[in-house]
Amino acid sequence: MLDINLFREDKGNDPERVRESQRRRGAPVELVDEVIRLDKAWRQPDWLVLKAKQDASEKIKSTEDNKKLTVEKTEEVLQAKAELEARLMAIGNLVHDSVPISMDEHVVVFAHSVLGSVDYQPFTVGTSAAIKYKRKDN
């Protein structure tokens, strides 16, 4: 699971990096925006819960209205946090820049000859990211 701070611009990170990683793996980029939206939705009520607790302690500590408000906001926060974590789990790790971009999981990155003495030259075929090999003497 990725650190939620990777999605937060106010923490000095760039969510576009996560979006690009999603594009490179062929996963939905919209999921990143949804995680950002849910994170903001979770953080706002969380702040309200803290504020409600402070207001409750500053005023009358035993009033039922403040207790109800605190319980309601706490439930909202827990629901928002659960939804956020569920969406966050759906996003894979960041794809490293050295990983070939292809929706085909069987891209040849390195090949060697079993014979050892035959020299092969790599070449690409069409627009495919796969690399094919042919003998240099042909």
Image (cartoon, helix red, strand yellow):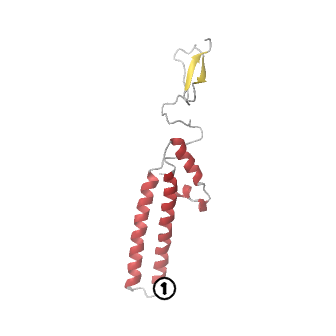
Q: Please, is residue 30 above or below residue 66 in the view?
A: above
Residue nearest the viewer, comparing 87 with 120 = 87
List x then y, in percent, for residue 82: 41, 61
List x then y, in percent, for residue 51: 49, 77
Residue reaching furthest bottom? Answer: 60
- SS label for mark 1: helix
Q: Please, is residue 73 above or below residue 132 in the view?
A: below
Picture quarter containing residue 76? bottom left
Res 94 seen here: no
Residue at left 41%, top 66%?
A: 78
Residue nearest the viewer, comparing 56 with 129 = 129
> Split into 4 quadrants, where in the image is the C terminus?
top right
List x then y, in percent, for residue 130: 54, 28
Q: Which residue is mark 1?
A: 58
List x then y, in percent, for residue 52: 46, 78
Residue at left 43%, top 64%?
A: 80
Res 27 seen here: yes
Q: Please, is residue 124 above or below residue 1 in the view?
A: above
Residue reaching furthest top? Answer: 137
> What's the residue type where badge 1 is placed?
Glu
Picture quarter containing residue 110? top right
